[in-house]
Image (cartoon, helix red, strand yellow):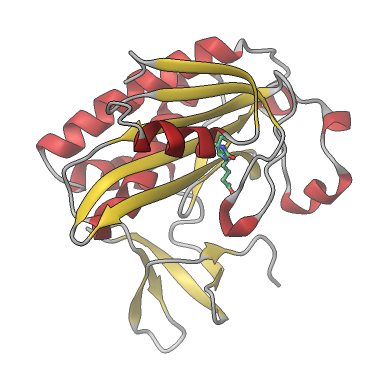
Amino acid sequence: LGKNVIHKEVADSTQSVAHKEALHGAPHGTVIVADEQTKGKGRMNRQWHSASNKGIWMSIILRPNMNPGSAPQLTLMTAVAIAEALSEIISVKPKIKWPNDILIHHKKTAGILTEMQAEQDCIKYVVIGIGINVNQTEADFPSELKNFKATSIRLETDVYFHVKDIIQKILLRLEQVYDAYMQTDFTHIKTKWEHYGYKIGEDIRIKTLRHSFNATFLGIAADGALLAQMENNETKKIYSGEIEWFHD
Ligand code: BTN
């Protein structure tokens, strides 16, 4: 990964650059990095604030030989790689909020946006977008983001990091977990994911497209779904949705 790096000072979104490159045949492992994004995208059509040189804004093109239904596992895998890379450089243990937010001290520091182009039962390519708040100070965050408990590595650790160093660590980790995953199966990732999992064993509130409900978070299933023990004691697998931030 990262043998082919495309660097932009400014991009609308590294995701859209990656899609264009992928459609023009960019090889597996191509990485697009921008210093600044003018239209950074988050999950669920949210905006992603990507101020100049304050964080990591990058997208990675993967061409895995796998079934489109397994693509969400790539997101969980990426979260593991980020958590492992951050663990090497900071003294706090990062947590992964299902499916893919990276938290430091319960606050969101990084997010992942996975987009896929598939044809019938075959993945053409996957773009994994990684956004990591690295050097923002309090004043760099717009006020509405305080509701989402956004933070940066610097705010939580008081240390200034070079964005490039973290990118290298993440790409290295990602390559390792990706190879291991391709050679074996998801079990390997699942164990690592659960090691960093946020609120496993606790009561959470889950929001899916249609409704919100309370459940106990049991962990993740062999296919990456969230395992929820419902109030009637049934176990349910959740494939898409989010864990809500606040509930009482
Ligand atoms: C989320 O948590 O909602 C996902 C955020 C993903 C942000 C990254 S920054 C690099 C890439 N380009 C984008 O426009 N989005 C992703």
Which quadrant of the rendered structure holds the N terminus? top left
Say which quadrant the C terminus sits in.
bottom right
Q: Residue at x 51, y 41 (%)?
A: 95
- Image x and y of residue 150, in percent: 72, 42
Q: Is residue 246 above or below residue 182?
A: below
Image x and y of residue 142, in percent: 85, 41
Query: At 54% across and 75% down in the image, what residue appears?
Result: 209
* Residue 36 or residue 175, whichever sits in front: 36
Q: Quadrant of residue 127?
A: top left
- The location of residue 85, given as percent across then percent down, is 44, 23
Q: Is residue 120 visible?
A: yes
Residue 179 quadrant: top left
Q: Is residue 29 left or right of residue 141?
A: left
Name the residue furthest left: 183
For residue 121, side relative to residue 210 (left or right): left
Q: Nearer the viewer, residue 126 or 189?
A: 126
How many numbered marks have been drawn onto this rendered protein structure?
Answer: 0
Q: Is residue 53 left or right of residue 112?
A: right
Residue lying farthest front? Answer: 24
Q: Is residue 191 above or below residue 232?
A: above
The image shows residue 29 at horizontal and vertical percentages of 31, 25
